Image: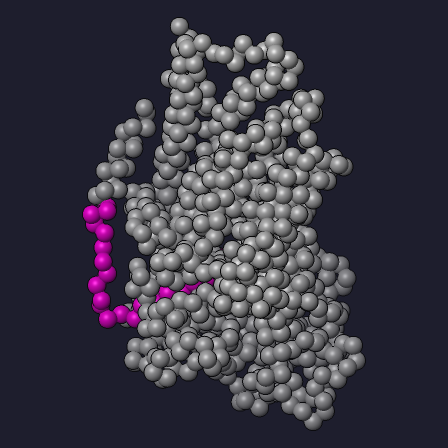
Amino acid sequence: MIEDEDAAAIIPQGFATNLGNGALPALEATDGAGASRESRRWLAMVESVVIPIGALVVSLALFGIFCALAGANPFSVYHSIYRAAFGNWYSFQNTLIRAAPIMLCALCTALPMQLGLVMIGNEGAFVMGGLGAVLVGTTWTSASHMEALIAMAVAGMILGGLWIMSIGSMRLHRGVNEVIAGLLMNYIAIAILNHLVNGPMHDPSSLNKPSSFPIPDANSLGSIPGTRVQFGLVYGIVACIASWFLIKHTTFGLKARIVGGNIRAARLAGLPVGSITLIICFLGGAMAGLGGMAEVAAVQGCASASLAAGYGYAGILVAFVSRQNGLGILFVSILLGGMLASGGMLQRENHLSDAIVIVFQGIVFLTILFSESLYGRFKIFQEKTA
Amino acid sequence: MKFRSLFTASAVAASLLLSLATSRADDGKVKMGFIYVGPKDDYGYNQAHAEGCAAVRALPWVEATEEASVPETTAVQETMQDMIEQDGATVLFPTSFGYFNPYILKLATQYPKVQFFHCGGMWHEGLPNNVGSYFGYIDEAEYICGIVAAETSKSKKIGFIAAKPIPQVLRNINSYTLGAQSVVPNATVQVVFTGDWSLPVKEAEAANSLVDQGCDVLTCHVDSPKVIMITAAKRGVMCTGYHANQSALNPKGYLTGAEWNWSKIYSDYANWIRAGKSLQAGTIPHLVRGGLKDGFCKLSDYGPMVSDKTKADADAAKAKFMAGTMVIYKGPIKDNTGATVVPAGTEEAQQDINLEKMNYLVAGVIGKPN
């Protein structure tokens, strides 16, 4: 993976400076080596664009074969997908609506992945974030619109952040496997949600669908003006870009990647592994929590079992497919949003089964994940060693 | 590149098809859209609605589109909007309970000319005028299933697997139990709540556990009874169905079942709309409710294990429902903690508001309502 290669290229330098001045000459690259490094970077970038696109084309072809076997014309299926997901502004909004909550959830896996942690507690953090926002939104009724929104967002981020940080802390201090802990913490979060909306937070007028009291309309986050896309999309885009910048272009991000690259080496180098782990986990959880806040404040208006709609799990998939890259998450979320958006058209126009969207997702994502094994295998992307 | 030719071919085809983009002409048909939360062949809630959709679609002057497995998120808002914008639907039936608030309400204000009919009886004065609710008193059919189950059971223990302890579900369990006790006073109904509408693994576990505890008839209130009916068949016990007809899953042990009859209700709506009636004009009522008599629900045909005497008892109760003389909640009724919930001399008829708020399980039910 490029990121890793980059990190690997940088890590020895980091140690070199730590160990003494003897390594300094290595940093003063000659002009020739600099150009070669430039071209290597450039080739790697091209490779990282061409391979996923190639995988996408292959998966579309495979999906077309599947549709043909299911009795539909593959080309009219492609047309439907295009028309339903990206064809015009109306349908592209549908895609963005579905992508919005997934972006933030994906960061909850992508950020801890920099440390080598496989964090799948997204659904739990999303639910806790939503609960936190509802708690604040329904109790602090004297707040102004802006105060309420900020308070809800902060509450959602803190609860979601602490939720994932607790998983990171269990891993750090007690060696508890974060995958299992994350999975179980999801169940716990959903159980807390169900308990609260059936008990202490229950609005007695919601008889057959137990829900919390609604957030007052005045405090609703609403849609991006002029669109029907919930405002959470803006949060998602900003968060993805900020995460990308944090990881790729700050010393903190570099430190995190060093921890992920080799935790023992990081300790030897004197990096504060513990606090880096907790901060990154908190940030990841805060992103999913913010997603939960946007879902209740902009869409659902209250907390109910519907809050656990599976966005967290979709986020795990997106994080892996986008190779934990913040900018990649932006694009992959929109791709997944488009697939989800096209599901309806495939049913209504092409008379395919409702399961077709899942087949489509499965084929596309498996092909993209498989394509990861192709990096470095095409000669054309390798630097010519003269 | 080896994919080059394929890519070119698909690009050409896509652009060709783009140019063929159609706009639907107005052909005077009633255009309806149906939306389900699960698959159309779940042997349950969604299949019942899909059968209703199939019935109206067969009418030559109806055009019906449908979409299945639409979650209770913004996804359903998008689906509704697509049906309106892309398919020209003017009548929508988003059938899942959780679609109502906020999704239907939001879209209803945006499209005041479209009529939204929601299954669940949640409309009340003050909500958009173009939204209506319909729901049936299917507990009447459950009452009769209780009669059949109790008389046919040998152990007189019935197992009931339910999703959530909400009023609608509690009412089905209670009516079932009262039906059972009307013919076998010492019959018990043991309840297991799974916690959600579709949890096949938990449902199968609950079914096995109830059979292990001596229940020889199983029934349920979950979205898809399929796995419970199959488990009953495997364990060689009897069952009564819910939502749709599941006799094919347990041909020997299926006694009868409480089925929705959406074909009739959807055909009624289609006819009203064809005749120019509408919610907006006040010519279609905002709340449409009813039981066996009004055709909202029906019973599955009796299975091979039901005796003639039982059939006669069940038919007698059904006749009372059809005549409108049957009241299920007739005091005195005690709950299973001993508290009186319907005092002696009180009759709570089906439309009684108290029944909508039910939060108890009647005596004879083993289980807790929360």
Q: In which quarter of the view is residue B16 placed?
A: top left
Residue B82: x percent and y percent?
35, 59
Residue at 56% across / 54% down in the picture? A153
Is residue B117 located in the magenta-colored stretch of the structure?
no
Q: Is residue A79 above or below residue A382?
A: below
Residue at 61% across / 58% down in the picture? A131
Q: Residue furthest bottom?
A: B345
Of A300 and B176, which appears nearest the observer? A300
Of B204 and B310, which appears nearest the observer? B204
Is residue B28 located in the magenta-colored stretch of the structure?
yes
Residue A256: x percent and y percent?
60, 31
Q: Main secondary structure of the magenta part?
A: loop
Q: Is residue B66 above or below residue A183?
A: below
Residue at 40% across / 5% down in the picture? A386
A214 left or right of B134 in image: right
Of B261 and B230, which appears nearest the observer? B261
Can you see residue B311?
Answer: no
B165 left or right of B62 in image: right
Residue A304: x percent and y percent?
58, 62
Can you see residue A275?
Answer: yes
Question: For the magenta stretch, what is the residue range?
Answer: B17-41
A326 left or right of A180 in image: left
Residue B59: x percent and y percent?
32, 70
Residue at 50% across / 12% down in the picture? A28
Q: Residue furthest front?
A: A21
Q: Residue furthest right?
A: B338
Q: Is residue A62 above or below residue B160?
A: above
